[in-house]
Image: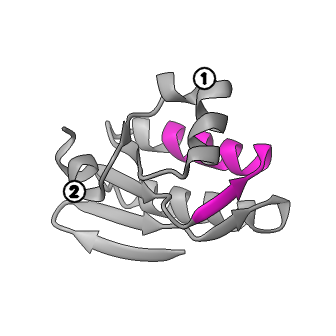
């Protein structure tokens, strides 16, 4: 995971797989950013090739923590397989998905 601060937002770039072994790390990072009251957290998923159910749960927990201060998590550039999983699990109804990080930052 790579964290980049952009104005009043943070871009969290995730590469490789998110599995049981590292989902806790992702959840911890999202909870930390939520505790800092970051208004917008963009997850750049371009380099992520797999996410397990525990990883999806970590993103949902981060989302719930962000909502405590009216923050949001936005997803950008998921690979086709990851997008399909998000659609299958109906998480596309919970999260906005953007084609670029810039669109996600702008909320367009």
Q: Quadrant of residue 85?
A: top right
- Left/right placement of residue 3 relative to residue 60 reads left
Placement of the N terminus among the 4 image quadrants:
bottom right
Q: Considering depth in this image, is 37 or 94 the residue closer to the camera?
A: 94
Residue 10 lies left or right of residue 82; in this view the side is left
**Residue on which disc 1 sits:** 90
Give the labeled residue for mark 2: 102
Q: Secondary structure at mark 2?
A: helix
Tell whether 3 sits left or right of 4. right
Mark 1, other Cα within 10 Å: few <14 / some 14–19 / many ≥20 = few
Closest to the observer, 78 or 27: 78
Q: Which residues are magenta?
A: 48-64
Please identify the residue farthest to the front as the structure is shown. 80
Mark earlier in primary sequence (1, 2) = 1
**Image position of 88 (left or right of 14):** right
Considering only vertical position in the picture, is 64 above or below 15? Answer: above
Identify which residue is drawn at 67% across, 26% down: 88
């Amino acid at each position: 995971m790579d964290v980049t601060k952009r104005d009043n937002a943070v871009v969290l770039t995730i590469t490789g797989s998110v599995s049981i072994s590292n989902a806790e790390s992702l959840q911890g990072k999202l909870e930390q950013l939520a505790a800092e009251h970051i208004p917008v957290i963009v997850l750049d998923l371009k380099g992520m090739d797999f996410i397990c159910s525990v990883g999806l749960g970590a993103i949902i927990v981060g989302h719930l923590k962000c909502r405590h201060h009216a923050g949001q998590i936005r997803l950008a550039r998921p690979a086709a397989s990851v997008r399909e999983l998000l659609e299958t699990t109906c998480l596309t109804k919970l999260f906005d998905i953007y084609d670029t990080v810039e669109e996600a930052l702008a909320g367009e």
